Image (cartoon, grey):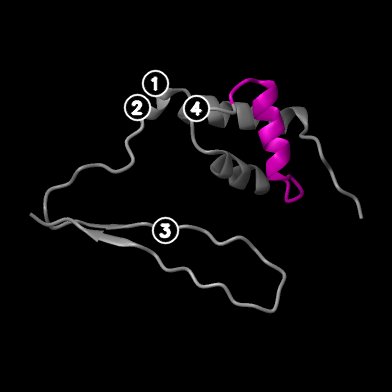
Amino acid sequence: MNIEYALTDLEKALAISLRTSSWVSIYEVWENLLEINSKISRNSVYRCFVKEKINRILQEHKDKAKKFKEYKPGFLHINVTYLPKFNSKFNYILSPSIDALEQ
């Protein structure tokens, strides 16, 4: 079994660029890098962030990012998430939450 623990220079540059340009979560950066190399681990991305001191999102960046845009009544907001790939005999069910904005 051949496990790659470290990111290449290109993968590091992409991870750092994604993180610092939009301050997305580590999971979003990791999912984007998985399209390039399916052997990348989330921990490799995290170690890269720690080394570059960008593993924590500063409060000023958190304040700028709004979770949900405010809409007038009548719009429907649906939260969607991805389930991880499990190699097991069990089926996993995703129950999305739906928020209907009413006044």
Q: What span is colored magenta in the figure?
A: 37-54
Left or right of 38: which side holds 24?
left
Q: Which mark is residue 63?
A: 2
Q: Quadrant of the C terminus?
A: bottom left
Label count reads: 4
Name which residue type carries label 1: Glu
Please give the name of the residue rendered at 57% of the width and 39% of the height, measured from the top-left corner.
26
Name which residue type carries label 4: Ile
Q: Which mark is residue 80?
A: 3
Whether the magenta-drawn stretch holds residue 63 is answered as no
Q: Tell me the SS state at disc 4.
A: loop
C-alpha separation, residue under disc 1 versus residue under disc 2: 5 Å
- Please tell me whether mark 2 or mark 3 is closer to you in this view: 2
The answer to whether the residue labelled 2 contacts the one labelled 3, judged by CB atoms less than 8 Å apart, is no
- Please tell me whether mark 3 or mark 4 is closer to you in this view: 4
Disc 3 residue crowd, few under 14, some 14–19, many 20+, Cα 10 Å: few
C-alpha separation, residue under disc 4 versus residue under disc 2: 10 Å
* Residue at mark 1: 60
To which quarter of the image does residue 7 belong?
top right
